[in-house]
Amino acid sequence: MRLPGLLACAVVAIAVLGGCGLGAGDAQPGDGVALRVTRDFGQRQLLARQGLELDADETVMRVLRRNADVETRFGGGFVQSIDGLSGRGASRTSDWFFYVNGIEATEGAADYELSPGDVVQWDYRDWGEAMDARAIVGAYPQPFTGGQDGKRFPVRVECQDADSEPCKTVKDKLRAAGVAVAGATLGTTGNQRVARVLVADWQRMRQLPSAELIELGPGRSGVFARFADEGAALELLDTDGDTVRRESAGAGLVAAMRPTDDELFWLVTGVDDAGVAAAADAFGSRATRNAFAVATGGGEVVKLPVVER
């Protein structure tokens, strides 16, 4: 049995990100580091600090300790509580996980060295249904502007129709954020060490081997939504993986996935053209801040999973 993501990476380094992950080119300096502390898959923000200065060899743990009351276990490598909110709640399946630039860390917080412009998000969540959610959308414009370990990687937007408004919208937003964007047709080969943004309706998207994991549920995809009825409906799931809402015409989804250490992509998709357009409008919007993934429908943007207040 695999350990929860943070426990596995806090005790031992599974892989050194700079050696096995994506990477090409130096990141541009940013204005310090952003630190965010959230809970319930980014639904509630508990702490936010922007423009934090970096000391030499600065780590995720040092930044957190300077800005919050932290208790640790396992010799200081595993975060037990932040500002009194402790891991292993009543369900015994809740812990702290951290992301840098929207990518779940694969080494401990005490060892993870930061770069200028990084966005660090600690989230307290239940891992019972989805032990791993390896990439999230809530750090935008990261990871496209800063990449990983201070190394930017090429960004490629693959579209079902390069002349469609959703495709143009996504490209324009990335370029406005200072990202150099290459265009390609959907399903272009050469996917390793490239950050891809896929823009298409689900009928076309589901033909891609990695994207189709969405239909298998959060235990496989890390995304708390799935398409049903051959892509004619989008089911929004709660933290237990149960359907709480079902959207059809005009429903869209913006989600990030990292099936392997060398593969990272974002989905901008929907049940139809209107759904793809709504997802493109939500892509990188303020409504996605801290979110793991978002669904669009009925003129609103919903963070996933759906959490009862």
Image (cartoon, rainbow, N blue to C red):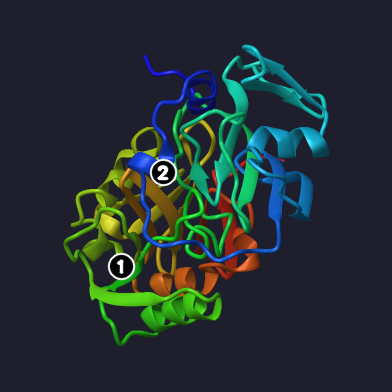
The amino acid type found where label 1 is placed reads: Asp
Please tell me whether mark 1 sits on a helix, a strand or a loop.
Answer: strand
Horizontally, is 44 left or right of 170 in the view? right
State the mark number for residue 53: none
Sequence order check, earlier mark of 1 and 2: 2
In the rendered view, tell whether residue 75 sits above or below residue 42. above
Q: Which one is closest to the eye, mark 1 or mark 2?
A: 2
In the rendered view, tell whether residue 197 sits above or below residue 78. below
Q: Position of residue 207 (x, y in %)?
A: 18, 57
- Residue 78 lies in what quarter of the image? top right
Residue 99 or residue 116, whichever sits in front? 116
Residue 276 or residue 268, whichever sits in front? 268
State the mark number for residue 201: 1
Residue 293 or residue 238, whichever sits in front? 293
Label 2 environment density (alpha carbons within 10 Å; few <14, some 14–19, many ≥20): few
In the rendered view, tell whether residue 170 sits above or below residue 7. below
- The residue located at (61%, 24%) in the rendering is 95
Spatial distance from mark 1 to mark 2, Cα to Cα? 34 Å
State the mark number for residue 18: 2
Asked if the residues shown at circle 1 and circle 2 are in contact, with their CB atoms under 8 angstroms apart, the answer is: no
Quadrant of the image containing the C terminus: top right
- Residue 10 lies in what quarter of the image? top right
Please tell me whether mark 2 sits on a helix, a strand or a loop.
Answer: helix
Label 1 environment density (alpha carbons within 10 Å; few <14, some 14–19, many ≥20): many
Residue 157 or residue 190, whichever sits in front? 190
Q: Position of residue 139 (x, y in %)?
A: 58, 56
The amino acid type found where label 2 is placed reads: Gly
Give the residue furthest to the front.
Answer: 56
In the rendered view, tell whether residue 267 sits above or below residue 259. below
Horizontally, is 66 left or right of 309 in the view? right
Q: Position of residue 265 (x, y in %)?
A: 36, 56
Quadrant of the image containing the N terminus: top left
